[in-house]
Amino acid sequence: MSIRRGMVKTVVGVVVLTLCGIAVVTMGTPKGLASSSSMIPLPAPGMYMIDPAHSFAYFGAWHHIVGLVRGRFNNVTGTISVAKEPADCAVDISIDAASIDTQIARRDEDLRGADFFDVKNFPTMTYHGRGIRKTADGAWVMDGSLTIRGMTKEAPLTFRFKGMFPDMPAGAPARASFHATAAVKRGDFGMTRDNLMELGPNPKGPDVEIEIDVEANASMPAK
C-alpha cells in the first residue's frame, strides 16, 4: 500500500516561525490591548519565549498536482526579540522534525525517513531572522533563513501581531499572540522523491504553504 509517499515533503517554519517562525515583532504596546486589527501596536521591546503548548506550525503540501495534504509539527520552541528599531528585531526558532504529524502513522514514519526529513541525521529544523519591514496592508515581513536537512534557504515570513492577552493572572508574564504565513519548495531542501507525480512536469512557485500561530511570554526587558 502506497500511502501517497510523495505528499507533504516539507514545511516549515517554522519557521517556522515559524516559521517559523513563526512570529515576529517590534515597538511599544499598551499591555492589555487585544485585537485582530493590523492597526494595533506591536509588543513592548524585550525578549519573548515561545510557548510550545500553545504554538502550532501547520503546512499544506501539493498532492498529485490537484490535491493538498495537511499536517503540523507538534514541538516548536524559540525566542522572539522585540527591539525599538525594526531592523534590530529577531527570531530564533527550533522545530523537532520527528514531531511531524499528518494523522497517519505510516505516512509520518515515511516522512521521518531519509527521502524526506531524515530525522536520524537532521533531528532539528531551524529558522533565523533579523529585521522586519511593514507592508502596505499593515502586515510585517521578515526575510529569514530556514534550515532543513542541513540545507539553508531564504524563507520570507509574513505576520500580523494579534495583540496581548488581556486576562493574565497577577504576577504572570505578559503574553503576545501572532499569526504568520510562508511558502517554500520541497525540492529546495533535497526532497525530490515522487515530485513528478506530486507536482507535475513544470511546477511553478512554492508547493508547500505554511501557517503559524504562536503565543509567546515576555521574559526580560530590552536593553
Image (cartoon, rainbow, N blue to C red):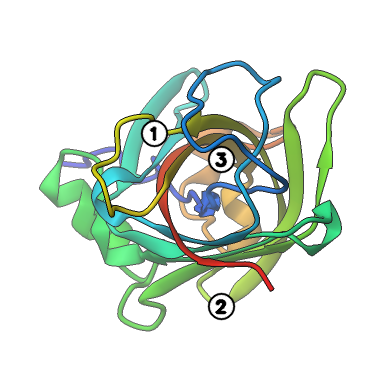
Question: Who's the residue at 29% across and 39% down the image?
Answer: 168
Please say if the residues under marks 1 and 2 sit with CB atoms less than 8 Å apart: no
| Residue 178 as seen in the image, left or right of residue 2 | right
Q: Identify residue for label 1.
A: 165
> In this orientation, which residue lies closer to the viewer: 49 or 153?
49
> In this orientation, which residue lies closer to the viewer: 171 or 54?
171
Judge the density around disc 2: few (<14), some (14-19), many (≥20) Cα neighbours within 10 Å.
some
Please say if the residues under marks 2 and 3 sit with CB atoms less than 8 Å apart: no
Count the marks.
3
CA separation in Å, label 1 and label 2: 36 Å
Q: Identify residue for label 3.
A: 196
Viewer-nearest of discs 3 and 1: 1
Above or below for 70 versus 116: above
At label 2, the amino acid type is Gly
Extreme residue in the bottom direction: 121
Please say if the residues under marks 3 and 1 sit with CB atoms less than 8 Å apart: no
Viewer-nearest of discs 2 and 3: 2
Q: Secondary structure at mark 3?
A: helix
Q: Identify residue for label 2.
A: 150
User: Upstream in the sequence, badge 1 or badge 2?
Assistant: 2
Question: Who's the residue at 62% across and 49% down the image?
Answer: 44
Residue 46 horizontal/vertical position (percent): 59, 62
Judge the density around disc 1: few (<14), some (14-19), many (≥20) Cα neighbours within 10 Å.
some
Task: Indicate which disc residue 66 carries.
Answer: none
